[in-house]
Image: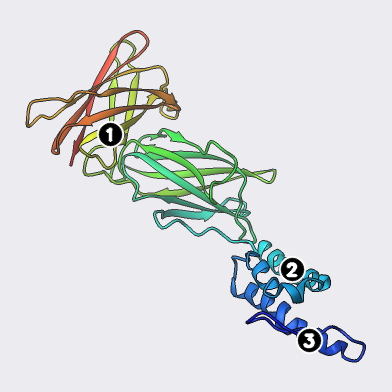
């Protein structure tokens, strides 16, 4: 009998040596498949199967039962790997800022952010775990920030997760803290969760710092006394040239209610105060949803810039403010 180089010769089965035939088949063909599948740990790819089985076309052509055996071994291993549940690890860019058990202790809540909390817009990422420590991937979550001061309490603008399904294990939302923690008062964040037919919540203390460069401004309309908060979002890493710009605007309806302001008209006017000039080719932000306004700002050189914004309501009444960008 002739065989290809590197392949294992398999004698035709006879009644005198069925055991020998079985072991040569196992050792020469099925076992390599089995071993290679184990070595792939977690990848569990079956892409190596054809290259192993077809090492000797002449020998393997009629061994239908061997092919079925190899497929069985591969399927078994692949199925075993597929049923393993991987618990998503916190992304390296996320920082855990608070955690706690809900009031009935049915859920563990973890709150993550991309950096320490500051006055202004803070993206948050909520992770939930059940009593067995398994990740909860579907829930309706509401974020409720609260500032407790000596003589009063007030809330702050918040964006609860828009979807009941987790994204890579997390429920993304945001809170706009309107002042820092300190002698004047302390912040807490209540996370209300509705999952598996039950509603539960946990209140977590959080610390809010004042950023080096202010990222939250406010103005009051003279006509009706309405107060608005404007949070700076982008650009976070400014560069010379055209940059995407984004702000979020909220109206203070009461001490506990800060709905998104969706009907404003914004005008953008960049200024470089040290040089006494502005820049061309800017696009004033327009509303894109949930109180977010997006546009473009053109920086013609590095240095200190003022991003002047004029915000008008439907009656034409305006508020004026600016954000500093220095790079």
Q: Is residue 35 left or right of residue 179?
A: right
Circle 2/circle 3 CB separation < 8 Å: no
Q: Nearer the viewer, mark 1 or mark 3?
A: 3
Can you say which quadrant of the picture contains the C terminus? top left
Q: Residues within 10 Å of mark 2 (few under 14, many from 20)?
A: few
Circle 1 SS class: strand
Question: How much space separates mark 1 and mark 2, taking CA atoms?
Answer: 52 Å
Q: Quadrant of residue 188?
A: top left
Q: Residue drawn 41% across and 17% down?
A: 263
Circle 2 SS class: helix
Q: Say which residue label 1 marks.
A: 243
Q: Nearer the viewer, mark 2 or mark 3?
A: 3
Q: Say which residue label 3 marks.
A: 23
- Asked if 119 appears above or below 49 in the picture, the reply is above
Give residue 76's mark. Answer: 2
* Residue 103 image position (x, y, % from top left): 58, 50
Furthest toward the top, the residue is: 315
């Amino acid at each position: 009998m002739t065989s290809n180089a590197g392949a294992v010769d398999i004698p035709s089965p006879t009644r005198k040596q069925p055991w020998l035939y079985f072991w040569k088949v196992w050792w020469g063909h099925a076992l390599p498949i089995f071993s290679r599948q184990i070595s792939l740990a977690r990848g569990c790819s079956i892409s190596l199967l054809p290259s192993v089985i077809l090492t000797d076309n002449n020998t393997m052509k009629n061994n239908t039962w061997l092919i079925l055996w190899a497929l069985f071994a591969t399927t078994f291993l692949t199925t075993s790997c597929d049923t393993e549940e991987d618990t998503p690890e916190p992304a390296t860019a996320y920082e855990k800022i608070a955690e706690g058990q809900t009031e009935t202790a049915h859920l563990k809540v973890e709150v993550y952010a991309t950096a320490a909390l500051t006055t202004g817009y803070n993206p948050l990422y909520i992770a939930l775990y059940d009593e067995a420590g398994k990740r909860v991937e579907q829930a309706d979550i509401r974020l409720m920030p609260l500032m407790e001061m000596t003589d009063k309490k007030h809330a702050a603008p918040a964006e609860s997760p828009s979807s009941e399904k987790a994204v890579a294990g997390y429920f993304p939302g945001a809170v706009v803290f309107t002042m820092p923690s300190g002698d004047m008062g302390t912040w807490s964040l209540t996370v209300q969760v509705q999952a598996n037919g039950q509603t539960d919540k946990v209140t977590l203390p959080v610390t809010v710092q004042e950023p080096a460069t202010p990222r939250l401004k406010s103005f009051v309309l003279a006509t009706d006394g309405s107060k608005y908060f404007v949070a700076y979002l982008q650009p976070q890493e400014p560069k010379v040239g055209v940059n995407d710009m984004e702000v979020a605007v909220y109206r203070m309806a009461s001490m506990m209610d800060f709905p998104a302001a969706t009907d404003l008209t914004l005008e953008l006017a960049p200024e470089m105060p040290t040089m006494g000039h502005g820049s061309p080719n800017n696009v004033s932000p327009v509303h894109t949803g949930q109180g977010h306004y997006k546009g473009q700002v053109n920086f013609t050189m590095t240095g200190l810039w003022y991003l002047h914004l004029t915000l008008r309501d439907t009656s034409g009444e305006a508020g004026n403010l600016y954000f500093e960008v220095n790079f």
